[in-house]
Amino acid sequence: MERLIFDAAAVIAILFAALMVLNRNPVKSVLALVVSFFFLAITYVLLSAPFIAAIQVIVYAGAILVLFLFVLMLLNVQREETPEKEPRPIQRFLGGAAILVFTIGLVEVLSGKGAAPGPPVAALVSGGRIGALARLLFTEYLLPFEALSVLLLAALVGAFVLVERERRA
Amino acid sequence: MIGSIPLSDVLLASAALFVIGLAGALLRRNAIAIFLSIELMMNAANLALIGYGAALGTREGQVAVFFVIAIAAAEASVGLAIFVALFRHTETIDVNKVNLLKW
């Protein structure tokens, strides 16, 4: 049953991700990705990671993608125009070839003899309780956690500096 | 709560999402669409991390995903600020038309 729900959610997430890439209109791309991330959050719940599912919805779908939408509307970017003449045909062909090779390699590795199908994903002993995750974050991973806050501050300041119009004093 | 999801399903879903993101990053021209594709690739990696974490019965995978999401937020803010600055300079965010750094 869980497998059925997981597979359904994953397939819908993949379909909307494909829609995101195929859509020429960037606003529709962002909206498709929001749906994709919601269904990814469902798969996280099924993999006993409810906290990650929550921040996936709140931070990713809620904050980051809304920021994308905000910038898109601020810049008023119309749909991506397709030039009559492809400016870089060779690079585009090479990109397609690279994707194809990568896909074949990935399928080969994942379905090959070398990679056993793996044990079924087991539920964590105490479910996916947040407390255990928080304990891990604030003990073993305290230094990266604190470094992260400095990184976010640096990103905040950096974003401010980048978009600031040059002031003539 | 769970126990019947094979790891291979998780990894295949992750691989499919990653490949779609890679295709988008390589083939789209709109800089924001490329950025979205990169976000999708990070989510594919997150799915694999959580899947492995659940399969191995540890929470380290979730901790890694937590850091990835926080770093993605930082990256998105700086990246979008760069695009805004770029748009002010060149009136476009089409990556084919931006070649200021080209030798």
Image: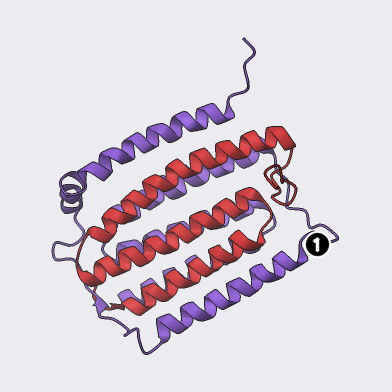
Front position in the image: A106 or B11: A106
For the residue marked with disc 1, what is the amino acid?
Glu
On screen, residue A121 above or below A26: below
For the C terminus of chain A, give its image quadrant. top right
The residue depicted at 70 percent of the width and 47 percent of the height is B102
Q: Position of residue A160 (x, y in %)?
A: 51, 28
The residue depicted at 48 percent of the width and 61 percent of the height is B41
Residue topped by disc 1: A86
Residue at disc 1, secondary structure? loop
- Chain letter matching colour purple: A
Q: Is residue A58 in sight in this rendering?
A: no
Which hue belongs to chain B? red
Q: Is residue B57 left or right of residue A165?
A: left
For the N terminus of chain A, give its image quadrant. bottom left
Q: Position of residue B61 (x, y in %)?
A: 28, 60
Q: Based on the displayed image, in which of its 4 quarters is residue B101 positioned?
A: top right
The residue depicted at 69 percent of the width and 44 percent of the height is B93
Q: Residue furthest top?
A: A169
